Each structure stands twice: as structure tokens, then as C-alpha cells.
Image (cartoon, helix red, strand yellow):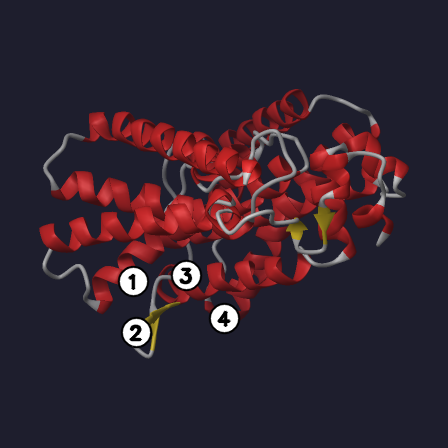
């Protein structure tokens, strides 16, 4: 795969290395998204701590991490697809379907939790495989293909559970929202594990190919990248992350809702954009998207603590998103010029 980084077929593909797009300036780290969004998160948390004196308590931190985990995992999966210059709408359907399955067919105990995890990953993987087959091999537009699978998944979810109800396993609800040693949130460890795996994957042959096809698909194909296989793997991996997000959401709600994944659809795109990942593909990273999800969740907390009506939450999230994206774009242009 080394020819991806050295070919002169196209400047975008030529700039892709095993660590992603090659940095041209120190500001690259900020334009990559992580630095900018981390700074914004710190500012918001300082405001939150000012409003809530107990915001730094272990319980409050764990609650915040638990609330962030489903969106963070969903945004992580969405990032993979966006990096390959695609869009995945099936996220809402996969999360809703896994949620109702866990609520209607609860399996208690550690063994039951393991089976439930495998079921969630299997549901997400199968839906992702269908998406990948439609997009990579049948050449359908990703929006059209994933919209169809989203509708199918939500339809199946409504057949299984036509109204909010059911009960998730007590072991899952208690243990996945607990703290190890009364300090470290289990949900935080799950998200950290996904981020750690990403740091390994992005330097692999697959990671190089993912950035390459997002930057310039024709040049990547000429460089020897198997574009179809890479896209297929991307959708499968994204689907499994959506399934994991459904598991973490179910642990929080402890009940089922056939529409539970719908709110996370637009928020996942917002988290990806807020993290600085280019919606045109080829630039960005999973960690920044996770930080984007954390920032959106924290913003909801800050607004609630400020007494702002929930009706205005979307308005403030949209304003913050626009400002962050514009600022990130300005830094990107400055970095490229220098």
C-alpha cells in the first residue's frame, strides 16, 4: 500500500500517509479538529462547573460520560463513512432496532450481556454489509441506500415493539452505567477502547486506503487501492459501532423505544462536522468526532443549568456548530497557505 503515499497521480492522494493527510503546518492539528473542539469543550466545562459546583464530582462526571457515550459511538461510525466521502442514514434504524431487541428479549447476567453485545454487533454488521454491498458493488448513492435500510430497520423495530416499553436487562442497565472503583465510568472505557482501536487502524493498510478514497477515489484506484472492498469494510465497521451505540443507549434508558435512534441521526452529523472532519471526505479523524459529540452533550447540560428551555437547545447547538466549522475552515486555509 506504500504506493498510495508516493504516487503522483493526484495531489490529494499523494498527500495521504499511514497517519492520514500529511501535516503542512503546526496549525494542522487544530484544523484536524481535535485541538479546536477540545478547547471549546474546556470552556464549556468551565461554565458548567461555575453553574454547578458539584460538576467535578465523580458522580456528575460519570453521568456526563454516560450521556455522551451513545452519541460518541454513533459519531465514530459516521466518521468512517464520511471519511470515505459517503453518508450513512441507517444509524437511526440500527440504534432503534438494537434498542427494542434488547428491551423485548432481555438476557440477564454477564453471559446474557455478552450475548446481547454480540447480537447488537451482528445487527449493525448485517445492516452495514447490506449498505456496503449496495454502495460499493451496486454503485448506489450512499444516501439513497442507507435511507432504505434505515426505513427497513425502523419498520422491523415497530413490528417488534409498536410503542415505548419493555425492559432492558438489569445487569446491562446497572453495569454499563456504573463506575469501576467508584471513579472510572464503564461507558468511558468503552469509548476509549474504540478510540484506541482507531489509532491502530488508521495506520494500517485499510486506514491508508480509507483516507485515499476520500481524498481522491480515481487516483486511489490507480494507486492499487481496492475501493470496493474498502467501502464495504467501512460500512460494516460503521454499522457495528451503531450497534454498540444502541447497546449503550439501552443501558441508559433501561427501556425500549422504536424511535430511540432518530434524535442521534442529525446529531451524529453535527458531531462529525463540529470535530472538523470534512464532509467531502479524506480529512478528519474519529477522536475529534467523539469530542464533538461530547461537546454537544455538554452544551445541553449547560443550557439546562442556565434555565434555557429545551425548545432552544437545537438553536444553540446549530449556532455553535456553524461558528466552530467556520473557524476551523479559516484555520485550515491559513495552515495551507503557510
Quick one: SS at disc 1? helix
Q: Which mark is residue 183?
A: 2
> Within 10 angstroms of label 1, few (less than 14), some, or many (20 or more) residues?
many
Task: Give the quarter of the image for residue 59.
Answer: bottom left
Graded by Cα atoms within 10 Å as few (under 14), some (14 to 19) or many (20 or more), the crowding at tag 2 reads few
Q: Which residue is mark 3?
A: 187
Q: Could one spot residue 261 in this view of the protein?
A: no
Asked whether disc 1 touches disc 3, contact meaning CB atoms under 8 Å apart, the reply is no
Q: Are marks 4 and 3 in contact (CB under 8 Å)?
A: no
Q: Nearer the viewer, residue 334 or 191?
A: 334
* Quadrant location of the C terminus in the rendered image: top right
User: Of the numbered discs in the image, which one, if any, rests on residue 62?
Assistant: 1
Decide which of tag 1 and tag 4 comes sooner along the chain: 1
Task: Give the alpha-carbon distance from disc 1 to disc 3, as whole Å.
Answer: 8 Å
Nearest to N terminus: mark 1 or mark 2: 1
Where is mark 4, residue-wise? 110
> Which of the pair 315/233 is nearer the observer?
315
Q: Residue at x 60, y 60 (%)?
A: 199
**Image spot of residue 105 (x, y percent):** 50, 50
Residue 269 at what x, y percent from top left? 48, 33
Left-right relation of 29 to 123:
left
**Mark 3 Cα-neighbour bin, 10 Å: few <14, some 14–19, many ≥20:** many
SS of the residue at dot 2? loop
Give the alpha-carbon distance from disc 2 to disc 4, as whole Å.
Answer: 21 Å
Q: Earlier in the sequence, mark 4 or mark 3?
A: 4
Dot placed on the residue nearer the N-terminal end, 1 or 3: 1
Give whichever of discs 2 and 4 has the lower sequence position. 4
Q: Using a 10 Å C-alpha cutoff, classify the residue at mark 4 as few (fewer than 14 neighbours), some (14 to 19) or many (20 or more).
A: few
Amino acid at each position: 500500500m506504500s504506493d498510495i503515499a508516493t504516487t503522483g497521480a493526484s495531489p490529494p492522494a499523494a498527500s495521504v500517509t499511514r497517519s492520514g493527510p500529511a501535516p503542512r503546518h503546526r496549525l494542522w492539528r487544530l484544523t484536524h479538529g481535535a485541538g479546536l473542539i477540545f478547547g471549546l469543550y474546556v470552556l464549556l466545562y468551565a461554565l458548567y462547573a461555575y453553574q454547578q459546583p458539584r460538576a467535578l464530582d465523580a458522580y456528575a462526571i460519570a453521568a456526563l460520560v454516560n450521556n455522551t457515550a451513545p452519541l460518541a459511538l454513533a459519531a465514530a461510525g459516521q466518521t468512517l463513512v464520511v471519511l470515505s466521502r459517503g453518508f450513512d442514514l441507517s444509524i437511526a434504524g440500527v440504534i432503534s432496532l438494537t434498542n427494542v431487541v434488547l428491551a423485548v428479549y432481555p438476557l440477564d447476567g454477564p453471559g446474557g450481556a455478552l450475548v446481547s453485545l454480540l447480537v447488537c454487533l451482528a445487527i449493525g454488521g448485517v445492516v452495514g454489509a447490506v449498505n456496503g454491498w449496495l454502495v460499493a458493488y451496486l454503485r448506489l448513492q450512499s444516501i439513497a441506500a442507507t435511507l432504505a435500510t434505515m426505513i427497513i430497520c425502523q419498520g422491523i423495530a415497530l413490528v417488534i415493539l409498536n410503542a415505548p416499553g419493555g425492559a432492558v436487562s438489569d445487569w446491562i442497565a446497572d453495569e454499563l452505567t456504573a463506575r469501576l472503583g467508584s471513579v472510572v465510568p464503564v461507558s468511558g472505557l468503552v469509548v476509549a477502547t474504540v478510540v484506541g482501536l482507531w489509532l491502530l487502524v488508521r495506520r494500517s493498510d485499510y486506514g491508508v486506503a480509507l483516507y485515499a478514497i476520500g481524498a481522491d477515489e480515481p487516483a486511489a484506484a490507480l494507486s492499487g487501492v481496492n475501493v470496493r472492498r474498502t467501502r464495504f469494510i467501512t460500512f460494516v465497521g460503521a454499522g457495528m459501532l451503531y450497534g454498540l451505540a444502541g447497546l449503550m443507549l439501552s443501558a441508559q434508558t433501561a427501556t425500549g423505544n422504536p424511535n430511540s435512534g432518530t434524535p442521534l441521526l442529525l446529531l451524529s452529523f453535527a458531531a462529525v462536522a463540529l470535530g472538523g472532519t470534512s464532509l467531502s471526505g479524506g480529512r478528519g479523524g474519529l477522536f475529534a468526532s467523539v469530542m464533538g459529540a461530547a461537546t454537544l452533550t455538554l452544551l445541553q447540560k449547560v443550557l439546562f443549568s442556565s434555565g434555557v428551555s429545551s425548545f432552544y437547545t437545537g438553536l444553540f447547538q446549530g449556532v455553535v456548530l456553524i461558528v466552530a466549522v467556520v473557524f476551523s475552515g479559516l484555520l485550515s486555509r491559513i495552515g495551507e497557505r503557510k
